[in-house]
Amino acid sequence: MGKIRKAKLSDVKYIYKLILYFAKRGDLVPRPLSELYENVREFFVYEDKDLIVGVCALHILWEDLAEIRSLAVAEEYQKQGIGKELVLSCLKEAEDLGIDRVFALTNSPEFFKKLGFEEVAKNELPQKVWADCIRCSKFPDCDEVAVLKDLTKNKL
């Protein structure tokens, strides 16, 4: 069985390949390799037998707001709870950092609702949230749903 840990610089090329695979399918926003190196500290990885098979990032936007982004699990590892573990690791880190609210933009709102997120109107999120949207293959016709978890309501 694998394990979740914080990403290292040596993981970045594997993180990039995993995100790129899902970005080409239109499931994720593509991330340039340089951006991944710059933001490697945001990422958790799921490692199984020396392979990076899952990734997820906690991107801080403001003193009380962060985003779960770039959640990806290799297809052959899906439906095993890895995505849930990755998101919970990000939520724990958000709580440790004193962040009150964490959101995600997703095509799988039910997944996040099982983890205590609630669906919210996209316009409830600050405008700066949409900075990455220009890189999305679905822009400007976004079909993603905004979900939000208030960490002050129920501690992890």
Image (cartoon, rainbow, N blue to C red):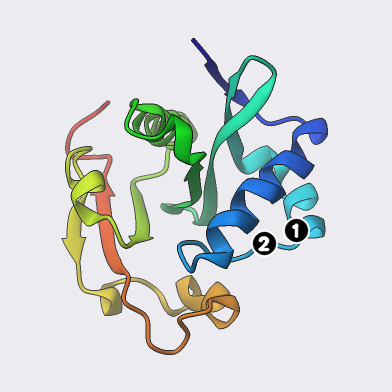
Inspect the image, locate mark 1, and give the three-letter code of the amino acid beneath it.
Glu
Q: Position of residue 1 (x, y in %)?
A: 49, 10
Q: Position of residue 146 (x, y in %)?
A: 28, 65
Q: Residue furthest top?
A: 1
Report how far apart the C-alphas of labels 1 and 2 lie in the structure.
6 Å
Name the foreground residue: 121 vs 2.
2
Residue 24: x and y in percent read 58, 66
Mark linked to residue 27? none
Q: Residue at x 50, y 62 (%)?
A: 28
**Which residue was labeled with disc 2?**
31
- Classify 27 as above or below 139: above
- Residue visible at 54% across and 44% down in the picture: 57
Rendering quarter of residue 94 = top left
Seen at 57% across and 32% down, the residue is 53
**Residue 67 falls in which quadrant of the image?**
bottom left
> Residue 144: which quarter of the image?
bottom left
Residue at 78%, 43% in the rendered image? 13
Disc 1 + disc 2, Cβ < 8 Å: yes
Q: Residue 35 shows which numbered tag?
A: 1
For mark 1, does the 10 Å Cα neighbourhood hold few (<14), some (14 to 19), or many (20 or more) residues? few
Looking at the rendered structure, the kind of residue marked 2 is Arg
Q: Is residue 141 left or right of residue 145?
A: right
Considering the image in quadrants, where does the C terminus appear? Answer: top left
